[in-house]
Amino acid sequence: MTVTEYGKQLFVTETSIPGLVVFDLPVHGDARGWFKENWQREKMTALGLADFGPVQNNISFNDAVGTTRGIHAEPWDKWVSVATGRIFGAWVDLREGPSFGAVFTTELDPSRAIFVPRGVGNSYQTLEPDTAYTYLVNDHWSPDAAYSFLNLADETAAIDWPIPLSDVEISPKDLAHPRLAEVIPIPPKKILVLGANGQLGRALRAEYGDAPHVEYTDRTELDITAPGLADARRWRDYGTIINAAAYTKVDAAETPEGRREAWAGNVAGVAALARVATANGITLVHVSSDYVFDGTLGRPYREDDPVAPLGVYGQTKAAADAAVATVPRHYIVRTSWVIGEGNNFARTMASLAERGINPKVVDDQTGRLTFTDDIARGIRHLLETGAPCGTYNLTGTGDPQTWADIARQVFELTGHDPARITGVTTDEYFATATTPIAPRPRNSVLDLSKIEGTGWQSAASAEKLVTYGGRVTS
């Protein structure tokens, strides 16, 4: 390395392959030698590099000029640099998608490094003797991992090797790799949907469909409260876990048995998920509730308002939020008054109307309906737009309503007289209850400014109920 390469500023250069980024590194040297910060998490993530969590450091020492290795695409990210010597590097995108087959080449010496995202094929040719090629990776080698390979001489990639491949040392394995037309692309990391048979789970199924990288499971297949969760999957193959499962029996949670079940499913299980996500660099999406608030605030609740749950269910959801917030990459999606396929408030009101029953409905709780298909679309929006991690309120929009307002709207939509609804207070409604009743927040209106700032727009609750009206009796 020449003296003129000393003293460069830390600098980032994007490449023609998405996510493949070259870094110029400051190297400090004198007559004794040189020093550099080969990997500095705080500085490099500040420049936009993913906090990829390396777990292993490897070094490949190459004796002779012209040693050529690759093209290997592994299911993990790499931080590649040169400790001594110089290489010509070639990278080929072997991931599923529009950039499949894209090629980037450059030289690396101790003053340059490159971040190689999962699924991008990596190869190099040494240009100086005694070259030490180093790389940090964020997973341990596994025989069960999915790899992909490309022949160094592939005509489509058409890499212009400085030294002809006929004149260099290549392993028999590398010589036998397939051409691009025969390469099996590396799929994206998996998305695991928990609670896939519940109301939100079914909406997520409809949203993601049969995409091969999306896996759906329920408690019979994966119980997050059971021992052994950490070894239940090869978790490094997963990029996202969407937790659509929860204990939601608000009143039953006030009983001794229900309290135990609520804390097991909503807290202990979620805490175990959080540990798995943290250990494996997974994005954890968790669905929370307006019940984490006491409902006494005179305005819509923001994401940063202090939680103050009134009952056991709300306490477990608040505790789960705290556990999920420890995961480096997380989304807590806080919602309220959920309506989805299956039993729900709208269908109950439609059934009462059809049977000639004139119900008493609570009119001192205020909020907005949220439809499960909107929650599913909102979750996908946060993930695919790369919105900053954190907590987001996600409900329907429009003027807040009471439960009695919504009941009257359902009666009207189904051709019945809305005047048949009698509004009562929460205390009046539950006055004759013989089993424990959970306290309800009176104000469940959530401020949507934060998620709307990401470009998301929910449907208006009242208008969505109109389009949903044809299904409330089905």
Image (cartoon, rainbow, N blue to C red):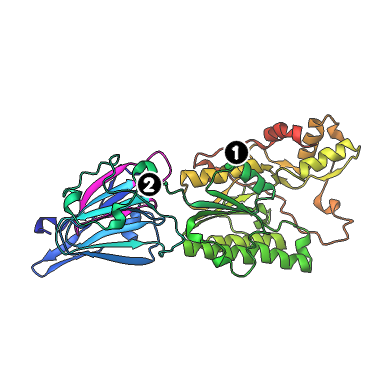
The relative height of residue 97 versus residue 257 in the rendered view (above or below) is above
Q: Separation of disc 1 and disc 2 at Cα?
A: 36 Å
Query: Where, quadrant-wise, is the N terminus in this rendering?
Result: bottom left
Q: Which residue is painted at 37% across and 46% down in the image? A: 94
Residue type at mark 2? Leu
The disc at residue 458 is 1
Classify mark 1: helix, strand or loop: loop
- Magenta residues span 93-119
Extreme residue toward the right, this view: 356
Nearest the viewer among 244 and 424 is: 244
Q: Is residue 383 visible?
A: yes
Is 187 situated left or right of 134 in this image? right
Q: Quadrant of the C terminus?
A: top right
Q: Secondary structure at mark 2?
A: loop
| The label number, if any, that marks residue 92 in the structure image | none
Where does the image place residue 450, in percent across and percent down from the top left? 52, 45
Is the residue 70 above or below the residue 357 in the image? Answer: below
Q: Position of residue 95 (x, y in %)?
A: 40, 46
The answer to whether residue 190 is above or below residue 230 is above
The image quadrant that residue 339 belongs to is top right
Q: Residue at x 58, y 43 (%)?
A: 210
Camera-nearest label, 1 or 2 = 2
The disc placed on residue 94 is 2
**Number of residues whose C-alpha sits closer than 10 Å to that of mark 2, classed few (under 14), some (14–19) or many (20 or more):** many
Q: Nearer the viewer, residue 330 or 306?
A: 330
Question: Which amino acid type is marked by label 1?
Answer: Ser
Residue 469 image offset from top left, x and y in percent: 75, 33
Residue at 55% over, 48% down:
214
